[in-house]
Image (cartoon, rainbow, N blue to C red):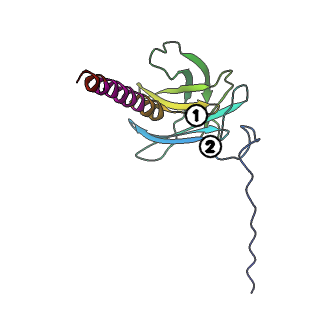
Amino acid sequence: MAVQAHHVLGRPAYSLSADSNTPPSMQVETQIGDYFVTYMAFPAFPKPNEQGRVNLYASRIDNGIPFVGKVTFKVRDDSWFASEEETLGVQPIDDNVYRQGFIFNEEGNYIITAEFESGGEPYSIDFPLRIGDPASIGPIGVTLAILVSVLLLVNILQRKRRFRLKAQR
């Protein structure tokens, strides 16, 4: 008997919407209290003014039974002084998944919070989300640039001091 194989090539992640079957931009798995939680953000590269979606799976650690209830999704800026929090929506379970759509108008780093209550105990999980292209120079690059600038400035000042001392002799 001959064995026949069939292979379907994948599609690129760009130019596909949040409802496509592309891989998520981020997948986070964590344990909180009695639950194992998995979070995914779609599409692979969320952009401003384009529709995106967050999927949340929550199941009990001891027996794997999914959480059945409502999950509240909130969002805030990922900055030191961000105090404004906006509710994205409250979602019921749909095929063991909590799905929350989003559209962000501006590029930036955001924190999405998923909140639910089980057995009289509140659960709150924060997940980072990047909208748009990341900055071309990150915090490490900024730190290195400052360090090189300080070293260069010290070097120039020391040379001037050395030339001044030589001139005085």
Residue at point 74%, 66% (across, down): 7
**Image label count:** 2
Query: Residue 121 — which label?
Result: none
Horizontal side of residue 158 vs 52, given as left or right: left
Residue at point 62%, 21% (across, down): 88
Residue 48 x, y percent position in the rendering:
69, 26
Q: Main secondary structure of the magenta part?
A: helix
Most foreground residue, 147 or 62: 147
Give the residue at the far bottom of this rendering.
1
Q: Which residue is mark 2?
A: 24
Most foreground residue, 61 or 154: 154
Q: Tell me which label, 1 or 2, sits earlier in the chain.
A: 2
**Disc 1 from disc 2: Cα separation:** 22 Å
Task: Give neighbour class at mark 1: few <14, some 14-19, many 20+ (Cα, 10 Å).
Answer: few
Residue at point 73%, 56% (across, down): 10
Give the residue at the far left of this rendering.
169
Query: Residue 136 — which label?
Result: 1
Q: Bounds of the magenta span?
A: 148-163
